[in-house]
């Protein structure tokens, strides 16, 4: 592709401040990694959180790149050069054009929120596949294109990887792409160049304040997915918003696209009535713009009723019938790492869940309270080098809803695990004043903590191992080592044997 043609993707969105050299040069690759440059490639210098791509322009030139796009002036370079006011946003726009503007050829469903994104995207994919077309998936657990499954590098990948994935979905015959859209991705313009058809909001609770600093900044990042629905040439757009969440009402007021609301506690376009919850699953009547119809699902807990409602809204907007939705919802067996049960013949429940925020932990434990027949034994920790403000809140939530709490490590990264536990312990001790009967202990080694929970459990108890879910690693220092809560729990059950 000719560079001058490629640059047309920036018109009206990114300002070109300066240009020199032959812009009719041919570009056969685009990258923001100086190590990946090749002859005929375009290098886009982007300032990241830790590394500034502008510092690697000399390396890109030595590597043979054909042209440069940057945000800062560059001197002493004879290559074709374009300076823009926002190279980060430009990267996504250029990537989209380079890969054929894939989001214009596929229905794009974006799901954002603090909790529930992964489950909602999995359910959306299942319901949309009832229409008879392949559906691509981009999210925290995996990326899927037809029968091809790849491990996820980020909840929302970088702009070039995202455009490549979407282009592969188009060529692979996918009719829709369902993706988790993180607040980091929106803040960093990773979705620049994407035009969404449907945007879903699940909820907003404290998380990522190490990055966003304030809840308002966090909210404004999420809001960008919805205000962006007014751009592009596509028709038939919609926002689907949880209005049981106060932030959802603010999004309704700002959405330029038609809105369907969903809720359990408030009047809304999509509601769940006659809800019945059990360890075997969930049933309810979905009252929707497409009529009322029964839903039976293997997904457990009230929080999954919200996720199902959101996905039902997406499916109805995209043309699925109530009968297709009912049939597809009943087939969904499980979402990896989301109340994923570990069964090895034991007479008590063991479930692994990704809950790693106060709200997610409360949702998980509230669901457990509804379903309990014995004690609730909760194993959890808090990640290192992340939002410290949520640590005591999670400790307090665990005591409020559990009978036994075991604090342990969860990706301590470069922090001292014991220091993290002490911060969580502040909330634990505060909550114990109201619930002094709750047993509590600290076991920094996560394997030992899980084994202790299994050893503690008896018939009808429920062991909940929270925080890592589908993850199969621990990050200790700067190293990633294999660790899978599901494997560790299963081994512990088999080794310790079953007890009444």
Image: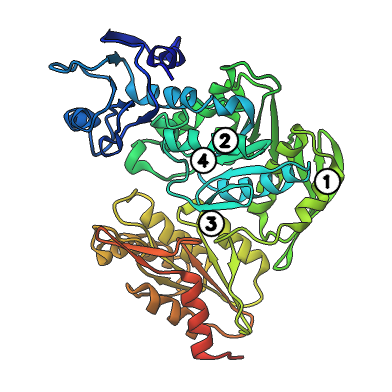
Which residue bears the numbered disc 2?
246
Q: Nearer the viewer, residue 201 or 372?
A: 201
Where residue 379 sits: x, y (%)?
Answer: 45, 70
Q: Mark 3 Cα within 10 Å, few/some/many (few <14, many 20+)? A: some
- Distance from the alpha carbon under mark 1 to that under mark 3: 33 Å
Quarter of the image with the C terminus is: bottom right
Instruction: Choose mark 1 or mark 3, whichever is in front.
Output: 1
Where residue 52 sits: x, y (%)?
Answer: 23, 32
Is 75 left, or right, of 100 in this rendering? left
Instruction: Choose mark 1 or mark 2, whichever is in front.
Output: 1
User: Looking at the image, which residue sits at the far left?
Assistant: 76
Q: Quadrant of residue 81?
A: top left
Can residue 268 be seen? yes
Instruction: Choose mark 2 or mark 4, whichever is in front.
Output: 4
Q: Nearer the viewer, residue 162 or 24?
A: 24
- Who comes first in sequence, dot 2 or dot 4? 4
Which residue bears the numbered disc 1?
324
Is 396 left, or right, of 101 in this rendering? left
Circle 3 sits in a helix, a strand or a loop, which is it?
helix
Which residue bears the numbered disc 3?
362
């Amino acid at each position: 592709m000719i560079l001058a043609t490629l640059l047309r993707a920036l018109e009206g969105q990114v300002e070109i401040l300066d240009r020199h050299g032959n812009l009719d040069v041919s570009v056969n690759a685009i990258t923001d990694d100086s190590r990946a440059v090749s002859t005929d490639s375009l290098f886009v210098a982007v300032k990241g959180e830790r590394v500034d791509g502008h510092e690697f322009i000399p390396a890109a030139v030595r590597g043979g790149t054909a042209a440069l796009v940057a945000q800062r002036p560059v001197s002493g370079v004879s290559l074709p050069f374009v300076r823009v006011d926002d190279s980060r946003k430009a990267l996504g726009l250029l990537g989209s054009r380079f890969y054929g503007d894939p989001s214009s050829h596929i229905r794009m469903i974006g799901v954002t929120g603090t909790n529930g994104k992964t489950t909602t995207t999995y359910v959306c994919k299942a319901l949309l596949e009832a229409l008879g077309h392949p559906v691509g998936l981009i999210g925290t657990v995996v990326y899927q294109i037809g029968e091809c499954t790849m491990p996820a590098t980020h909840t929302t990948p970088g702009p070039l990887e995202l455009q490549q994935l979407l282009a592969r979905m188009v060529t692979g015959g996918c009719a829709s792409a369902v993706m988790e859209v993180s607040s980091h991705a929106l803040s960093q313009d990773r979705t620049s160049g994407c035009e969404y058809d449907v945007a879903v909001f699940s909820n907003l609770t404290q998380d990522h304040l190490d990055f966003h600093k304030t809840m308002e900044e966090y909210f404004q990042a999420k809001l960008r997915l919805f205000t962006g629905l007014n751009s592009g040439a596509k028709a038939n757009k919609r926002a689907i918003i949880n209005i049981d969440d106060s932030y959802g009402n603010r999004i309704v007021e700002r959405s330029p696209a038609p809105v369907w609301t969903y809720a359990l506690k408030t009047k809304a376009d999509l509601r769940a009535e006659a809800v019945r919850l059990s360890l075997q699953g969930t049933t309810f009547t979905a009252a929707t713009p497409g009529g009322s119809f029964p839903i039976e699902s293997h997904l457990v807990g009230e929080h999954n009723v919200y996720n199902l409602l959101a996905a039902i809204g997406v499916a109805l907007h995209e043309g699925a019938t109530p009968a297709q939705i009912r049939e597809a919802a009943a087939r969904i067996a499980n979402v990896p790492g989301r109340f994923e049960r570990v069964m090895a013949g034991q007479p008590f429940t063991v479930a692994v869940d990704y809950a790693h925020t106060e709200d997610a932990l409360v949702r998980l434990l509230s669901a457990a309270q509804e379903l309990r027949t014995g004690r609730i034994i909760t194993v959890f920790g808090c990640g290192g080098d992340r939002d410290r403000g949520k640590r005591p809140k999670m400790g307090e939530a665990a005591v409020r809803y559990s009978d036994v709490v075991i604090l342990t490590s969860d990706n301590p990264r470069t922090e001292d695990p014991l220091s993290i536990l002490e911060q969580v312990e502040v909330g634990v001790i505060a909550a114990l004043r109201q619930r002094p009967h709750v047993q509590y202990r600290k076991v920094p080694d996560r394997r030992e903590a899980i084994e202790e929970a299994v050893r503690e459990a008896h018939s009808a108890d429920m062991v909940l191992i929270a925080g890592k879910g589908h993850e199969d690693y621990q990050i200790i220092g700067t190293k990633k080592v294999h660790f899978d809560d599901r494997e560790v729990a299963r081994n512990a059950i088999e080794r310790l044997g079953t007890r009444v």
